[in-house]
Amino acid sequence: TSLTTPALFVGSTGSMGPPSAKASGAATSTAMPDKGRIFLKHNGLHLILEVDRADPIGAAALSGIKDITMEGPLTTILDMEDSVSAVDAEDKSKVYSNICGVFGG
């Protein structure tokens, strides 16, 4: 099996081989069960597929995936133009100065 969009693949770690006939019950020559992580990236967000066929959750899944970690986007909107507390130029200047201090650390 392969990705529909191979460009989404970033990398992987661990000991994972090609898909085998484990799901169908056929014998396999793999001495170590698949265990590792697959890293994907889509629209600038990262996705980690954690594969562990020895884990009860991974053993129950045909894919061997025991967990999925998704990076969430973080968006903050700062609207100070219509703020009641910043009505004149002097007040707005203070607000912008404070925001610059927050961003600067």
Image (cartoon, rainbow, N blue to C red):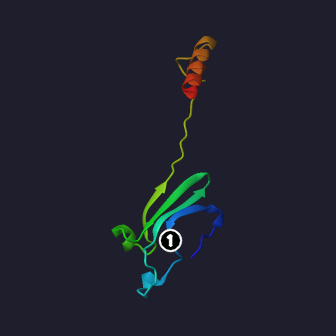
Residue drawn at point x = 55 percent, y = 54 percent: 46
Q: Residue 93: x percent and y percent?
A: 61, 16
Residue drawn at point x = 45 percent, y = 60 percent: 68
Q: Which residue lies furthest to the bottom in this view?
A: 26
Name the quarter where the C terminus is drawn: top right
Name the quarter where the N terminus is drawn: bottom right
Q: Residue 11: x percent and y percent?
A: 58, 61
What's the residue type where badge 1 is placed? Answer: Met
- Number of marks: 1
Number of residues whose C-alpha sits closer than 10 Å to that of mark 1, classed few (under 14), some (14–19) or many (20 or more): some
Residue drawn at point x = 59 percent, y = 19 percent: 97
Q: Residue furthest front?
A: 31
**Position above or below: 62 against 74:** below
**Tag 1 residue:** 16
Q: Which residue lies furthest to the left in this view?
A: 56
State which quadrant residue 60 falls in.
bottom left
Q: Residue 54: x percent and y percent?
A: 37, 71
Q: Residue 30: x percent and y percent?
A: 46, 80
**Residue 12 visible at all:** yes
**Position above or below: 44 against 10:** above
**Residue 82 visible at all:** no
Local SS, label 1? loop
State which quadrant residue 25 falls in.
bottom left
Q: Residue furthest right?
A: 7
